[in-house]
Amino acid sequence: MSDTAELYYILKDRYDNYLRELTSVEDRLSAYSGAIASIAVKSINENKYYYKQWREGTKIHSKMLGKVAPGAVATEESEILERKKLLSRREELIKLINILEPQREELRKLAMAPDIDEEFTFEVFWKNELSSRVSVHKNRVHVSRYIIHPIRQIFHSDTITRHQLMEALRLRCFEEGRADIDVKLAAIGLTEYDPLEIVRRTHGVSYNDFIWIRFPGEKLCAEDVLVRALV
């Protein structure tokens, strides 16, 4: 694995953990309602009482909790402290997510691109009709399109970038963010999400169309790989 890919997966894991934690924090905060309160002590007729106070707009509201005694308002104090901690953590998580999001996306683009020195070709078919042939040489990607059709063709130009190629292949893969992604990858012998490696194994087939991808050395036809019966 390249340093870029390794860094991407480290950052992605951290980013995903922050998102999961944020969801958990939001769920826990949803158990509370109204403004954050504080505990005050008031003296009435020489007796001391605990009061719960909170602000709504410009008004301050209060509610008597009982006479002052050791630990008498421990539950209320704990709830207030917990809520403040959750609000502080939520604010921190949102900042971290906003910082990591563009970095994660930029690293993803770099990590998902094949090695610049890697050269390869593959053919895209619509059923058993050749739709296009792709040739990748260093930083150049050339597409020979034999069908110009919005449904039977996955490329929009004869010359594209490596990033555009990976994005086109990504559309022929299962979603990276799905809950069972590790299971899906393991089923095809992968541990990392790599669009090129995924389509090498799945041939980029979909239930939605009759497009599939053949790599050199594969003696296959549409009937061998498509998940839908040819009509």
Image (cartoon, helix red, strand yellow):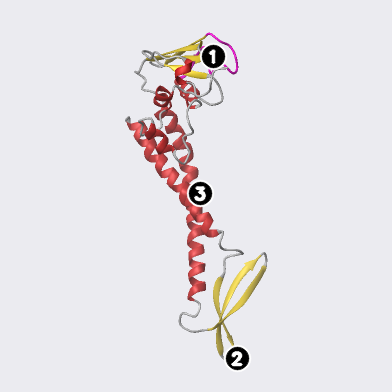
Point out the residue furthest to the bottom here: 46
Left or right for 216, reference 145: left
Residue 35 drawn at (x, y percent): 60, 64
Residue 163 drawn at (x, y percent): 46, 23
Residue at 38% from the left image edge and 13% from the top image edge: 216
Place residue 51 in its image quadrant: bottom right
Magenta segment: does it hold 195? Answer: no
Left or right for 207, reference 60: left
Location of the N terminus (image quadrant): top left
Numbered range of the magenta stretch: 146-161
Q: Which residue is mark 1?
A: 157
Callout 2–callout 1 Cβ contact below 8 Å: no
Query: Foreground: 213 or 223?
Result: 223
Q: Which residue is mark 3?
A: 94
Mark 3 element type? helix
Q: Report the Cα–Cα distance between label 2 and label 3.
A: 48 Å
Q: Evaluate whether residue 205 shows in this view.
A: yes
Q: Which residue is mark 2?
A: 45
Q: Report the Cα–Cα distance between label 1 and label 3.
A: 39 Å
Q: Is residue 186 above or below residue 40?
A: above
Q: Nearer the viewer, mark 1 or mark 3?
A: 1
Query: Foreground: 221 or 53?
Result: 221
**Amino acid at circle 3:** Ile
Choose the circle earlier in sequence order: 1 or 3.
3
Q: Nearer the viewer, mark 2 or mark 3?
A: 3
Mark 2 element type? loop
Q: Which mark is residue 85?
A: none
